[in-house]
Amino acid sequence: MTWSLRRTEYQSVAVAVNNADRVVWITGFVRPGKEIPFSRVGDLSIAQVTDSSAIWNLATPGGNYQLTARGHSGKARVISLIAFPASANPR
């Protein structure tokens, strides 16, 4: 599913669900000129960071997640969150 958005820093959002209607990933596309600093997305001290991406691998009791911010010069144009089953390791 994809939505085009108005009046937000995001231009569009795409979502995928599994057979149980559980969200398995969501991706937001930031409007040009509204890029979001990686540090606003998450704590950079626990991320794998380059000039063009920041990746957080997060384990919770309910499942594991990978949060990714991609862009240029430490600012995100695309932000994605992927959900993994609790038994999966996203690394």
Image: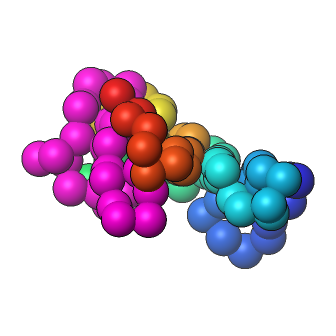
Position of 49 compared to 12: left or right?
Answer: left
Q: Say which residue appears at 44% left-offset and 51% top-offset.
A: 86
Q: Tell me if I can see residue 3 in this picture.
A: yes
**Total number of numbered labels?**
0
Q: Say which residue appears at 44% left-offset and 65% top-offset.
A: 62
Frontmost residue, 26 versus 19: 19
Frontmost residue, 90 versus 2: 90
Image location (x, y in percent) of residue 7:
72, 74
Magenta stretch?
Answer: 40-67
Frontmost residue, 24 versus 33: 24
Q: Single out the residue that lies furthest toward the left.
A: 45
Q: Say which residue appears at 32% left-offset and 51% top-offset.
A: 58
Q: Is residue 50 above or below residue 80?
A: above
Which corner quadrant holds the C terminus?
top left
The colour scheme of the drawn protein is rainbow
Image location (x, y in percent) of residue 10:
66, 59
Image location (x, y in percent) of residue 82:
55, 45
Q: Say which residue appears at 31% left-offset and 53% top-offset.
A: 59
Q: Tell me if I can see residue 4 in this picture.
A: no
Frontmost residue, 11 versus 3: 3
Image location (x, y in percent) of residue 41:
36, 57
Q: Single out the residue that lies furthest toward the front.
A: 87
Q: Was residue 28 drawn as part of the magenta stretch in this picture?
A: no
Position of 23 compared to 87: left or right?
Answer: right
Position of 49 compared to 7: left or right?
Answer: left
Q: Was residue 54 drawn as part of the magenta stretch in this picture?
A: yes
